[in-house]
Amino acid sequence: MSSVVIDNIHAEPGEKVFGFIEVGTSSVSTYRIPVAIVNGIESGKKLCLLGGTHGTEFASIEAVIRIIQSLDPKKMKGTLLAVPVVNGPQFEHRSAFLSPFDQLNQNRQFPGDPEGTLSKRTAHVIFSKIASLADALCDCHGGDITEDLDCYVISRVGKNEELNRKALEMARCFPGEVIVSKSGGTPGTTGEAQDLFGIPCITPEAGTPYPVRERHVQFHTDGIINILKYLGIIEGEPQTFNAKINPQEYHVIAKTGGIWHTAVEIGQYVKKGQILGNLTDLFGNVLDTYTAPKGGWVRFLRVWYSVNVGEPLISVSYI
């Protein structure tokens, strides 16, 4: 087993090392990415594990931190390359979806630009210095400020069928009920590493910023542990799950602005015709009541009190 070096962070075999990589500066601040290297005592594969690519998706961050703390490098064959918070500015400012520094969505900037704004430079550092060393990539996500997401996984579909197969196998390591595995995915996500570096990429999704639910953190940590077993980095057989691949779904959209009162919970199974919630005006008068056109599983739920016309309220998956 050899040492692992990422920028100024150096881990010998059997070591767990923490550090920061500088990304860029503003007039008053220096922005850094936190990196943990857990370098096994024996040679093996490397997993790039990311959290907080959207900095308010807190369940993903908590899960990555717990994994870093739980691993013993002296019992590992291979290496974990972990970034608990990719998007530091969004994490610190608790801003929705976009970096307050350059107003960009961090998960639309990959593979990045070393001469670009902070989000583009962050993407470049993540890919060029960390993902490029890895044999697989797992980018943990969840609901942003306005969202509550239940447990599912996005399995990257790229140009190479073998990598697509491996990504799907990794996705099955998570105890969710749905896997999204479709070609023509959103450009600029961390999944770009699949074709760029020839490594399988997945994006597990679970949680809401407030509150951080234990079951959503556990969804992430259980899946990551199974991936580490799947890659042979830690001992044991991975548990796999028979999730539904690409179920149909429908979206409930606000017909008008108002105050949103949900009648269901994330992860709940709803029946056709069941009331999902209603919108009221500022005097409490009901403007619209929304019912389920089909039965299914609530995968996305809007959690903000105020709603504008055309905004999504609920997404339901069904077979």
Image (spheres, helix red, strand yellow):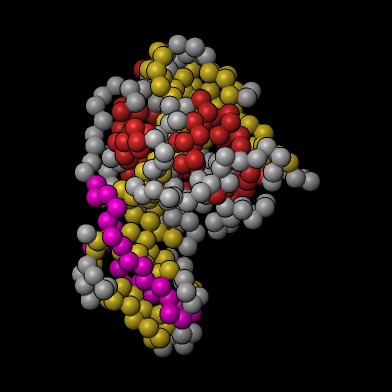
Asked whether the viewer can see residue 122, the reply is no
- Residue 221 shown left or right of residue 272 in the figure: right
Q: Residue, x 31% and y 48% (percent of image)?
A: 179
Q: Is residue 33 above or below residue 296?
A: above
Q: Residue, x 28% and y 60% (percent of image)?
A: 248
**Toward the viewer: 124 or 18?**
124
- Residue 306 location (% of width, % of height): 49, 74
- Residue 237 location (% of width, % of height): 24, 27
Residue at the outermost right position:
27
Q: Is residue 131 above or below residue 109?
A: above
**Toward the viewer: 22 or 181?**
181
Residue at the outermost top position:
1
- Residue 96 location (% of width, % of height): 55, 58
Q: Residue, x 31% and y 39% (percent of image)?
A: 168
- Residue 309 shown left or right of residue 251 in the figure: right
- Residue 166 lies in the magenta-colored region: no
- Residue 130 location (% of width, % of height): 54, 29
For the N terminus, the quadrant is top left
- Residue 266 lies in the magenta-colored region: yes
**Toward the viewer: 309 or 112?**
112
Asked whether the viewer can see residue 259, the reply is yes
Q: Residue, x 47% and y 36% (percent of image)?
A: 195
- Residue 317 shown left or right of residue 46 in the figure: left
Q: Is residue 271 above or below residue 100?
A: below
For the C terminus, the quadrant is bottom left
**Toward the viewer: 218 or 232?**
232
Highlighted magenta segment, given as a residue range:
243-269
User: How many numbered marks, from 0 up?
Assistant: 0
